[in-house]
Image (cartoon, grey):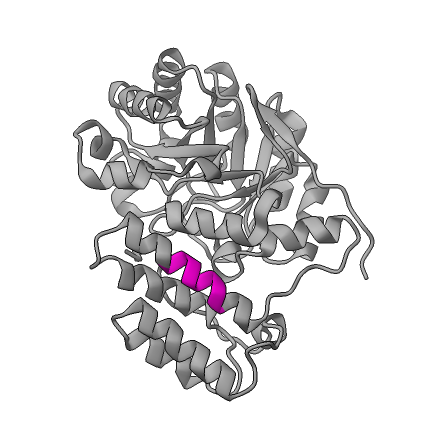
Amino acid sequence: MAPAFTLPSYSVGSVRVAPGLVLAPMSGVTDSPFRRLVKRCSGEHVGLVMSEFIQIEMLTRGQMMGAIRMAFDPSEHPIAIQLYGADPDMMADAAQMAEDAGADMIDINCGCPAPKICRRGGGAGLLRDLPRLASLLDAVTARVKIPVTIKIRNGWDDSSINAIDSLRVAEDHGAQAIALHGRTRVQLYTGLADWQAVAELKSRAKIPVLGSGDIVTPEDARERLRSGCDGLLIGRGAITNPWVFRQIAEAAQGKEPFQPTWRDVIDALRFYVSLLHVHYPPRVAPGRMRMMLSRLLKGFPTDPGLRVRCLKMTDPIAMLDHMEAVATETGVIDRVRAADLESASDDPVDVASAA
């Protein structure tokens, strides 16, 4: 068993994040059902959850999808609502709406690499227009009383690394924490995240610094914490393994981390689909369920065709019933899932477009 290590915690205004393990925002993924699934699997070991990013125009123009994306259950506190856009007044209006809805903090997305987002001046596009980022922060911090944070990347590309400059803007214009995904916009999600950049940012910062990128296992978390960061954002690793926060916390205590069985996976998915039916119109649930199954069925033993068959189904309950029947018949339902992930292939599904 690996030795214990210390998990950090931090405060953002009056909000205490303990432990400093944060469910990162992911478009098309971190809606209320998914956030509650992660809280069910990892419990108190999730210090903060973040919404998928929400276009400010979607909120301020009263579009139904904006309200759906911002909706959250009381069990999710503390929760940060992440917004994206480029208009300061509209960003302030959207932030006010999130505060009125009961959000604990506002996060401004300065890291999304999607071309359609950047072309509008939002997401990572703000890294090329720091004066606009300053204006956004001024507008939002003047409007709301809850803490405001930002999430950035190293820069637009290798020739324009400006995380330190972004930090200065954040500190000078009222942001109370900053998260760094250690890749440039041009990198998208390729290569490895630069955690030395996180360490450098932390050494210069007066506000809490969170690191993001390539955290899948407790050992990953242990290594990333060597950067000295105040917290870890975990995104894609939580889709495949919503127990990862619990596993990290238990490893930090020197315990053998919990490993879910295939029965645990099926039970978690039944909980998730029950939330989908409450949160969305019926037509949405199958797509969201396929996204989750594409991750959680990775490495299923003895029947590699199960994943494909389930993904072709349109009824989420039928997907789960079939999965449970096969797992029971083949005698693997109580097998620890982690042992089967070693041979799992990479999943090509685009989480940003899941809906």
Left or right position of 77 against 322 = right
User: Does the magenta stretch mainly form a helix, a strand or a loop?
Assistant: helix
Nearest to the observer: residue 108 or residue 279: 279
Question: Is residue 298 in view from this perspective?
Answer: yes
Task: Name the residue located 69 percent from the left edge and 40 percent from the top edge.
Answer: 227
Task: Name the residue located 80 percent from the left edge and 50 percent from the top edge.
Answer: 4
In the image, residue 299 above or below residue 164: below
- Where residue 41 sits in the image (x, y, percent)? 55, 54
The magenta-colored residue range is 266-273
Task: Name the residue located 35 percent from the left edge and 27 percent from the top edge.
Answer: 129
Q: Is residue 17 magenta?
A: no
Indicate the quadrant containing the C terminus: top left, top right, bottom left or bottom right: bottom left
Left or right position of 130 against 199 = left
Left or right position of 40 against 222 = left
In the image, residue 300 above or below residue 12: below
- Where residue 27 sits in the image (x, y, percent)? 35, 48
Task: Name the residue located 71 percent from the left edge and 41 percent from the top edge.
Answer: 7
Nearest to the observer: residue 133 or residue 286: 286
In the displayed image of the protein, which residue is found farthest to the top? 142
Left or right position of 159 against 43 = left
Question: Is residue 154 in view from this perspective?
Answer: no
Q: Is residue 269 magenta?
A: yes
Nearest to the observer: residue 114 or residue 127: 114
Indicate the quadrant containing the N terminus: top left, top right, bottom left or bottom right: bottom right
